[in-house]
Image (spheres, helix red, strand yellow):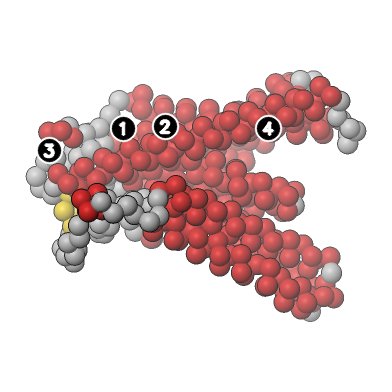
Amino acid sequence: MQRDFANTMIPLLTVFSALIPSVLLVWFFKSRDAHPEPSRALWATFGLGAASIVPTIIVEIPIGMLLQTLMAESHLALGFADAFFGAALPEEFFKMGVVLLYCLRLDAFDEPMDAVIYGVVAALGFATLENVFYVMQHGLGNALMRAVSAVPMHALCGAIMGYFIARWRFPTGARENQASRGRPGLLVLAFAIPAMLHGLYDGPLLAVKHMVAANNSKPLSEIQSLGVLIGIGVVFVVFVSEVILGLMLVARLRKEQRALIASGAYRPAAAPPALPETASPLATGVVPPVGTAVAWTMIAGGFLIASAAGMIALGLGVEMAVRQEEIRDLLLGGSVLVLPPLAVGLVLFILGLRKLPRKTPRISPFAASPSPPSPSMQ
């Protein structure tokens, strides 16, 4: 009985730990959209993103075997070739396929910001299922690293991809131009830039992986150890650059979205309730008590704490498999270790989102105004 219970709980806790970072990132990007997308469309995109791992694996396995045969002697070359041709290019290709072949056909896909939202959700669907596989194969330590770096990396690649798809799909930012499309080169950028960042992120990690595997668990030499440190530094720089670029592009689309709303290009499908008139903090000389930096700190801290709670839950599942006679005690102790940090992380994350500046009221659903946007948006 206890064995069956443990066998049931381990996959559930594994999925739980993998879902937490993805759900929080979807929540974050959706909160930055003044016109939230339908939940059904988001879940379908998430599911298709997860399903895209199947054709990706079909492509990646033979490529990986071929590269291993051709470049086995050079760990650095093998690592980067594997990163680009065995991971980044096929993964970004199939994730982009979800956005272009499914999301682009949705009625709700009607403004530039939507491309970012659907790009992120498709990427996180893929990252979540990939994370489950990695956790099952490589254990808790790998899961923690992926939760705080690899999963956000996928999300940011989706956001960057979505930005360039938005520039292609809405060259003027107007919904009325249903048949209009931008330059085809924008679609090339939508694929090439995320794939490049993805490959540069994975390259040093896979090179180190191949080098360690070739050493057969022997200690690394000084030169190899230095190479590992340099590789970690490259990964860090690529990740930070991706964060900055992704957030800058999302902020640019949000600014355009606010301008479209202000210009009358969009009107609410149903009139929203009147907002109370309040004096501007700048006009009254009152400075808001919580700044943007504090809000971002709360969001990042909440994300890390909640993700750590997911990793503790995963560790609990591993302990259940090893110490099946103590399942009841493990559940009681684990609930104390998991639930409080999860609650604290969620509260910090939510409060941080609420304290971010929001210059326009959230309106959903909305319909396009029959009047064209102002000339400044053309």
Q: Quadrant of residue 55?
A: top right
Q: CA distance from mark 3 to mark 2?
A: 27 Å
Say which residue label 1 marks.
168
Image location (x, y in percent) of residue 290: 40, 55
Q: Which residue is mark 3?
A: 374
Seen in the picture, residue 375 relative to 126 is either above or below; the reply is above
Residue at (73% x, 65% y) in the render: 317
Q: Nearer the viewer, mark 1 or mark 4?
A: 4
Closer to viewer: mark 2 or mark 4: 4
Mark number, residue 190: 2
Is residue 287 rendered to the left or right of residue 326?
left
Amino acid carrying label 3: it is Ser
Along the line of sight, the residue nearer the viewer: 282 or 127: 282
Residue 252 sits in which quadrant? top left
Question: Judging from the image, what secondary structure is the residue with disc 3 in?
Answer: loop
Q: Residue 232: x and y, percent?
A: 68, 32
Q: Is residue 293 above or below residue 363?
A: above
Distance of label 4 from label 3 (alpha carbons):
48 Å
Name the residue furthest front.
285
Q: Residue at x 28, y 54 (%)?
A: 286
For residue 232, the mark is 4
